[in-house]
Image (tube, rainbow, N blue to C red):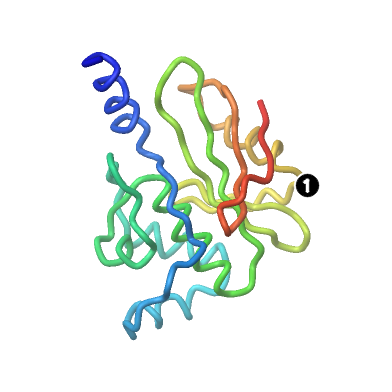
Amino acid sequence: MKKIFILILLTIFLSGCGTFNLNGFIIPDDMKFLTVVESLDTPEKICDYMKENFTFKTHCLYAPDPYTFWKSKEGDCNDFATFATFVAHYHGYETYQILIYFKGTLLGHALGVFVEDSKYTYSNNKAYCPINVDTFKEVVSHYFETCFEYELQKYKVCDYENNLIEEGK
């Protein structure tokens, strides 16, 4: 039993990419935050802002909401993806998050996905990737063109309300 408990804790600790459900997130009444959100009206601007203002830090046991992430200015891939999809959705973009699971490890990754001109683009942590593809599978394939450490086990796509839209390998 002790080994199972340790394995569960290690899985949570090493994954670093939990999910924050944006469905029901209430925008706080903080004028500085609202001003930032208002100014970031394209996915490219969102990613540029994250690149200039946020630092990568794994959150082992929780996934903060976009406001908490903005205040702390540090987070993991899920936090970047959640912030990016929240802000883009605020400006009327259709958004998704792709959760990627790697073969042979407990690690995972999250991407923020945007629909721009009927094509998918995405954010990989702070990087804007304007690839303009037609499928989520193509987004995942493009990500793995630059991810040399791991192989794909599977991926899941969730919409803004955290509904599962697609699974693939």
Quadrant housing residue 140: top right
Q: Is residue 28 left or right of residue 114?
A: left
Name the side, left or right, on which 17 lies relative to 13. right
Residue drawn at x 63%, y 73% is 92
User: Furthest-front residue in view?
Assistant: 1
Give the percent coordinates (x, y) of residue 75: 31, 50
Q: Is residue 62 above or below residue 138?
A: below
Quadrant, the C terminus: top right
Spot occupied by residue 85 in the image (x, y as percentages of width and height)? 53, 60
The reply, left or right, for residue 3 in relation to residue 168 is left
Count the numbered circles shown: 1
Residue at figure coordinates x 55%, y 63% from the top left = 44
The residue under label 1 is: 134
Residue type at mark 1? Answer: Asp
Circle 1 SS class? loop
Nearer to me, 64 or 71:
64
Mark 1 burial class by Cα count in 10 Å: few <14, some 14-19, many 20+ = few
Residue at 66% x, 35% y is 167
- Please state the horizontal and vertical placement of residue 36, each as a whole percent of the image: 40, 77
Quarter of the rendering occupied by the N terminus: top left
Instruction: State the image coordinates of residue 153 (x, y, percent, origin top left).
Output: 57, 22
Q: Residue furthest left?
A: 2
Give the answer, above or below, for where 30 lies relative to 151: below
Which residue does the image show at 56% across and 63% down from the upper left? 43
